[in-house]
Amino acid sequence: MSEQTVTPGAGVTPEDAGAPVEPEKDEAAVEPEAVVATAAPAPHPVPEGAPPLPEAPPVVPPAAVAADAAPKPPRRVLRAVARWTAAALAFGVLGTGTAFGIASLERTDVPGLATEGDGRWDYPELSLPALPADSPRPFSPGNPAEIHHADLRELLLPAPAGAKPDKKLTGGWISTETFLDAYRKQDRRSVAQLLKDAAPRHIAARGWTMPDGTTSRIYLVRFNSTAFASRMIDDLNVGSSAGTPLARTDTTDLDPAWGSVNDIENLSSFVFAEQAPFGAEHVRQAYTLAGDTIALVVHERPGKREAARIPFQQTLILQNQLLA
């Protein structure tokens, strides 16, 4: 803030009030006292016998009134006020910026304001694999067939921190027989026939077990075209129902906790949860149709407690992001 300086007005001393006017002075330079004295009207004679007029109030020079009404602060005070005002503005701007920065962060990013853990698993930072030269992404305008050109194994979600890897589902290619283990024994022959008819190109899978006993398995099945992948979903009767039952499941219905807000553009997810009463374990499962590829995500938790909803949804959303 720039300093504001006030130029004091030129006042008249009592000694100057009666001093003779210099001939070279202009009429505009006459002191206020002289102006007031010449401007005063001549007194009228008081008629005989009339009561005396009240005594007129004393005339105060304008300079004196201005001096008493608004005393001029010393320049040092003005400079101090300017410095404190500038400091207050600076701290105000800084405080506003800090508040905006905090408001723009997620609550868990602000030290001291982290919310209690909601059960999410600690996954590593994800990145999409490199594509072969001149190969488009699956849902780009230059890829109307919605083909995934990246290595299917590199599209598998990695295991979170603290997970114990599955020795059979290591993140590499698996056989059709290993994939069929995901289904009940009495249904494997029919699913095998569906796979034979659809002729998938590759199947990759990864599995792990968390410290609370929850087992996670992810299967990616790539077909020759989107039409074959979509037909496989239909042949498994996946839609309003979970379709062909998975191993160790009883009554499985649509999961009401999954909402459209969790869906990812260009992908179709069908999410189910085993309903009580369930058997020796609780199962959550989901199919995702992503162009030429189908993802099957399964979480199982042994005992009478349900497999946690939040880490299951987290796993499914992250896997879908890799396929999008």
Image (cartoon, rainbow, N blue to C red):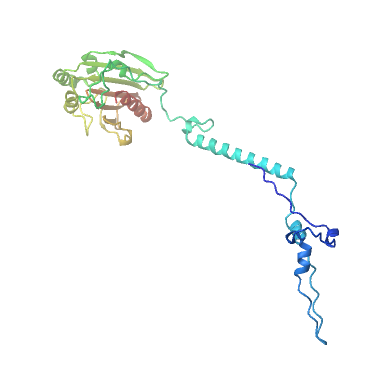
Residue occupying the point 77% across, 68% down = 38
Where does residue 156 sit, x and y in percent of width and height?
Answer: 31, 19
Residue occupying the point 22% across, 15% down = 202
Where does residue 113 sit, x and y in percent of width and height?
Answer: 52, 33
Looking at the image, which is closer to me, 198 or 49? 49
Where does residue 69 sit, x and y in percent of width and height?
Answer: 73, 58
Looking at the image, which is closer to me, 204 or 40? 40
Vertical arrangement, residue 321 with respect to residue 80, above or below: above
In the picture, the quarter occupied by the C terminus is top left
User: How many numbered callouts?
Assistant: 0
Looking at the image, which is closer to me, 246 or 71? 71
Q: Is 160 positioned to the left or the right of 50 in the image?
A: left
- Location of residue 15 by image quarter: bottom right
Residue occupying the point 33% across, 33% down = 262
In the picture, the quarter occupied by the N terminus is top right
Residue 110 in sight in this render: yes
Vertical arrangement, residue 122 with respect to residue 40, above or below: above
Where does residue 251 sit, x and y in percent of width and height?
Answer: 25, 31
Q: Is 268 positioned to the left or the right of 197 in the image?
A: right
- Location of residue 162 by image quarter: top left
Q: Is 99 positioned to the left or the right of 295 in the image?
A: right
In the rendered image, the residue lying farthest to the bottom is: 49
Residue 115 in sight in this render: no
